[in-house]
Image (cartoon, rainbow, N blue to C red):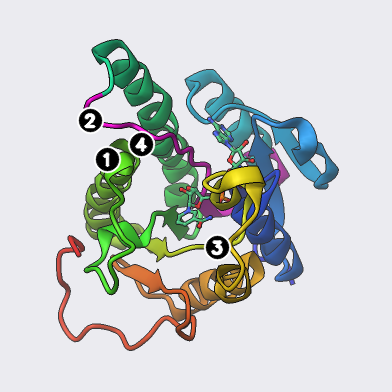
Amino acid sequence: MSRGVAIVSGAAQGLGRAFAERLADEGYRVVGFDIKDEVTSLEDGLVADVSKREDVECVVARASALGEITCLVNNAGTWRSTLVDSSWEQALADWDFIMDTNVKGVLMLSRAVVPFMQRGSGGHIINVSTYYVLPAKSRGTNNPETDLYNASKWALNGFTDAWAKSLRKDDIRVNGMCMGAVDTAMLRGLFPDNELPSGFADSVMQSPDIAQQMMDIIDSGRTGENFGAWVGEPITIGEKPRLHRRITG
Ligand SMILES: NC(=O)c1ccc[n+]([C@@H]2O[C@H](COP(=O)([O-])OP(=O)(O)OC[C@H]3O[C@@H](n4cnc5c(N)ncnc54)[C@H](O)[C@@H]3O)[C@@H](O)[C@H]2O)c1
């Protein structure tokens, strides 16, 4: 049974690829796009940059021509070490590099998709964030060189919270996924020679397990929540909070 069309940003590798593959297995027609052309190995893979409005509008137009858009996974994200005592020039270049993709990209892609979901039968928006925005469970969170990346993901809390409320009337559910370390190129890039330290490599989470959590969120029909996933703990969606609460960690 077709579940409509799903759009996944940053789908060439890592979590985005796992999300795209899982949604396809579940019966969605998936339009995955990425700035890397490896994405063209997906059935409906497109090369596009989420930080460019014309690219975003082109992706959404292509997706809407395939059927009713019912799912958007705002996955594309980028990371760079941004030390607070770096030069102003570096800091402002880092701001544009990180915020244009991680925040403005989410804003633009969601704004482009929402009118289609409103005209159709609603849908799901998943904002891929990080456990940095949740209360810390270990000393490993909020590394000092991740201030801008961290700030970009906190900004998504504002989108998730506000859109969940304003789009509920249209049956559009909006949630955040806030995972810890998952074995992807982004994570490996933090370590020398892209090698995960022994011990850590065995415990780190895997993208298909996070994709399972994404399906559980979609199938739950819940909205306006941040769902965490922590290394060493079962990956679940947990009980629904009894009262709506602002998702500020
Ligand atoms: N891997 C982790 O441990 C982890 C933890 C928490 C959150 N996340 C988040 O998960 C998401 C996916 O991360 P990942 O680990 O798979 O990273 P990744 O670097 O392996 O994959 C990200 C993909 O996004 C693409 N991308 C980057 N900028 C883009 C742009 N402007 N337009 C289109 N595509 C673009 C990249 O080319 C890449 O294919 C990110 O938002 C990241 O912040 C990852």
Quarter placement of the C terminus: bottom left
| Residue at (65, 35) in percent of width and height | 34
Q: What residue did someone put label 1 on?
A: 147
How far apart marks 3 and 2 lie (CA) works out to 26 Å
Sequence order check: which comes first, mark 1 or mark 3? 1
Q: Do the residues labelled 1 and 4 touch (CB within 8 Å)?
A: no
Task: Give whichever of 192, 52 is nearer the camera.
Answer: 192
Q: Are marks 2 and 1 in contact (CB under 8 Å)?
A: yes
Q: What residue did someone put label 3 on?
A: 182
Q: Which amino acid does label 4 sit on?
A: Val
Q: What residue type is labelled 2?
A: Val
How far apart marks 4 and 3 lie (CA) works out to 21 Å
Q: Are marks 3 and 2 in contact (CB under 8 Å)?
A: no
Q: Which residue lies furthest to the top in this view?
A: 89
Q: Residue 227 carries which label?
A: none
Quarter placement of the N terminus: bottom right
Q: Nearer the viewer, mark 4 or mark 3?
A: 3
How far apart marks 2 and 1 lie (CA) works out to 8 Å
| Residue at (64, 47) in percent of width and height | 194
How far apart marks 4 and 2 lie (CA) works out to 20 Å
Instruction: Find the magenta span and give its range.
Output: 64-85
Q: Is mark 3 within 8 Å of ligand 1?
A: yes
Q: What residue did someone put label 4 on?
A: 103
